[in-house]
Image (cartoon, rainbow, N blue to C red):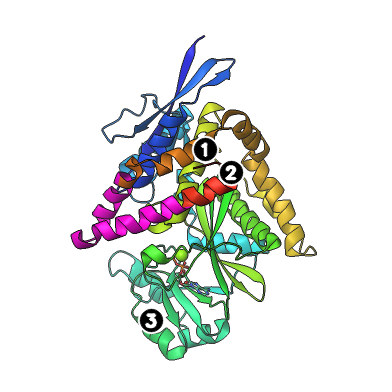
Amino acid sequence: MAVVTRRIGLSLGADLCWPAAFEMLVKKLDLAVQSPEGEIRFDVQRVRVAPFDLAEPCRYDLVVDRLTHWFHTTREWIKKSVVADDLYVLNNPWSIQSNEKHTTYAAMMRLGLPIPKTMMIPPKAYETDGDWEVTVRRYNDLFDVGEVGRGVGYPAFLKPYDGGGWVGVTQVKDERDLRAAYDASGKRVQHLQAGVKNWDLFVRAIGVGPQVQVVKYDPDQPLHGRYVVDFGFLDGPGWRTATRVCRTINAFFGWDFNSCEMLRADGVLHPIDFANACPDSQVTSLHYHWPWLVKALVRWSLFCAATRRPMKMNLDWRPFLDARDPGLDLDAQLDRYDAIARAHFDADRFEDWCQKHLADFDRIAVDVFSAPEMRDVIRAKVAALYPAHEVEAFTDHFHGLVRFWCKTERDRIGMGE
Ligand SMILES: Nc1ncnc2c1ncn2[C@@H]1O[C@H](COP(=O)(O)OP(=O)(O)O)[C@@H](O)[C@H]1O
Ligand SMILES: [Mg+2]
């Protein structure tokens, strides 16, 4: 029988741990899918950066891309490969480039999700060259930032409209705080967003294709402790809401891999930050939850590559907008959106495909994550981030949490030691 190879590329920057685990999983799985084309096999390679001919076909079927946000050679190579060669890429590069936090808030407000009141504020400082000054003088209204603050209410968060990684985010408790924060905010366009008051739970929903995992989050901890190891923090309906909100956002924006932060107050989950395409994937942040993420990336990559899932190059917002009915409660509304989102991600077919072709995957994954080499993978990432004298202790810490995942996973799937 003919053998056809599907090439999966990992487009990487500082990442060390998840690519290594991804490669180990695919290797150990050694998947062969019988298809009318022949026997499909999978080859994972790390994408190199070099001069490229715009007319030269891309050799990959799918790329998991970590660079589009900031590494322009790769971003343009990805865009060329999608538009010219039907490459499938996690995530849609045009959507990453053009949909800032701002658009995501506006769009999800229109869909009726409980996003806190948000104002956009022109920047405090401007460039002095070109037409900046004349434009500002001629057309910018003078405004009182205190009045904006009174309209939004306190506490509030002043944050860049296109932000990420907590850079430039300031909590303001009163007008004095707001004035000081705005005066210091420089040339970046800002949002002032009402703070969610008295929240009792912070979760991050991580989505990969149609798969969503919800993790409790503690923003007050140092980086290695923010993702919390906890279970049962949401009841069934809460879990369903969190997963459906995440899948809806991800389908809406064409982000196959994204995370959604939500704060719960009075039983309502308020999404506050969900333009996080390609979120942190390191074992040093995700620890216990890291195997879930790597497995989800492997499953979705294999499915998309094997079935030649067509890349959705253009976003299609109309079906979501048409599904909005202000007369519906949020639950009924999310039923509608999630049906569109699941169809977007071909969720039923994906789940069937996994059952058929990845029946042993959970067991194989436990073997891979509990193998002695996994400690070396974790250590390499820790050594890249931590001072020398902390490397052993933090390696043990993260490795211990991954081993704990192996234990709970063995219990979950009824697998012996
Ligand atoms: N509306 C809000 N209500 C309560 N806390 C908020 C709100 N907006 C931001 N925060 C806090 O500030 C942090 C950073 O803001 P966020 O919008 O997530 O920015 P970034 O995109 O940089 O992660 C959040 O993780 C949360 O702890
Ligand atoms: Mg955030």
Label 3: how many Cα within 10 Å (few below 14, some 14–19, many 20+): some
> Does 358 sit above or below residue 280?
above
Give the residue at x 66% y 44%: 342
Q: Mark 3 near ligand 1 (CB under 8 Å)?
A: no
Look at discs 3 and 2 and give the one toward the viewer.
Answer: 2
Q: Secondary structure at mark 1?
A: helix
What number is the disc on residue 413?
2
Look at discs 1 and 3 and give the one toward the viewer.
Answer: 1
Which is nearer the N-term, disc 1 or disc 3?
3
Q: Secondary structure at mark 2?
A: helix
Name the chief secondary structure element in magenta.
Answer: helix
Give, as a three-letter code, the residue at label 1. Answer: Arg
Q: Secondary structure at mark 3?
A: helix
> Does 210 sit above or below residue 394?
above
Read off the magenta span: 376-404
Of all residues shown, which one is farthest toward the front? Answer: 417
- For mark 3, what is the residue? 181
What is the quadrant of residue 136 in the picture?
Answer: bottom left
x then y, percent, for residue 167:
36, 68
Give, as a three-letter code, the residue at label 3. Answer: Ala
Q: Marks 1/2: CA distance? A: 8 Å
CB under 8 Å between callouts 1 and 2?
Answer: yes
Give the residue at x 30% y 55%: 395
Q: Check if residue 381 falls in the magenta segment.
A: yes
Which is nearer the N-term, disc 1 or disc 2?
1
Of all residues shown, which one is farthest toward the top? Answer: 1
Give the residue at x 34% y 51%: 70
> Does 74 sit above or below residue 245?
above
- For mark 1, what is the residue? 363
Give, as a three-letter code, the residue at label 2. Answer: Ile
x then y, percent, for residue 5:
45, 21
